Image: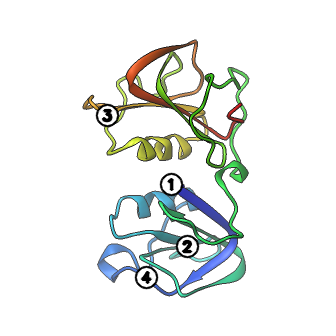
Amino acid sequence: MWQQISWRSLFQGGDLPHNLGGHGLETSSPKACAAECETRSSCQFWTHVKEWKVNCYLKTTFDFKEDNGSATSGSIGITCDDDQSDLSEVPRSSSSLSNKVPKNPSSQPENVCFYPKISLSGGDLIPDGLQVSDVNNCALACYERDECLYFQFVSKWKKNCFLKTHFFKEETFPEAIAGSIGLSCT
């Protein structure tokens, strides 16, 4: 799984070096803290504490987890532990445009659905697309925008990630992987 969230949890220990944000950054939200972690190759865990001014702590690992009602922690690319929440529990904005998903998903990891060889037409949030390193980072870019429900990744293109609020048509396209976030995969 590419990202997991653990609500009301504070990860202790394992901070990155100070110059990489391990001793704290100021961010606006848990999503912003997760995005900071995603930009650092050595970061695998993060903690955001809502009530603190310096509120985002980036980590390579953590020693233990403690309960804290104002904290949210998470991981990028690995499992936090067995009792974490998943992305299906992350609040998403509702959209009246569409709540359908393409047919025949290849996976359903916590309502993050991937549809190999499928292209989605319409509903682009950023008409020219984004450049990301892989399909998981495309899914993360979608997750970070409340209005995004769908994404499309084409590895051979320079601008290879397309975020969408809805789509009008799905087509077979061998180089594409489409996806949805926060919707049932069936």
State the image coordinates of residue 56 (x, y, percent, origin top left): 50, 72
Amino acid tagged 4:
Asp
Seen in the picture, residue 92 relative to 67 is either above or below; the reply is above
How far apart are the two marked residues, 2 and 4, measured between alpha carbons? 10 Å
Amino acid tagged 2:
Thr
- Mark linked to residue 47: 2
Q: Secondary structure at mark 2?
A: strand
State the image coordinates of residue 182 (x, y, percent, origin top left): 67, 41
In front: 103, or 84?
Answer: 103
Color theme of the render: rainbow
Contact (Cβ within 8 Å) of mark 2 with mark 1:
no
How far apart are the two marked residues, 3 and 1, measured between alpha carbons? 18 Å
Amino acid tagged 3:
Ser
Instruction: Using residue 96 as the reference point, say whether residue 134 is left or right of it.
Output: left
Q: Which image quadrant is residue 22 in? A: bottom left
* Residue ID for mark 4: 15
Residue drawn at (48%, 61%), measured in percent from left and top? 76
- Mark linked to residue 155: 3
Q: Which image quadrant is residue 176 in? A: top left
In front: 138, or 177?
Answer: 177
Q: Is residue 29 visible?
A: no
Whichever of labels 2 and 3 marks the residue nearer the N terminus, that label is: 2
Whichever of labels 3 and 1 marks the residue nearer the N terminus, that label is: 1
Q: Secondary structure at mark 3?
A: loop
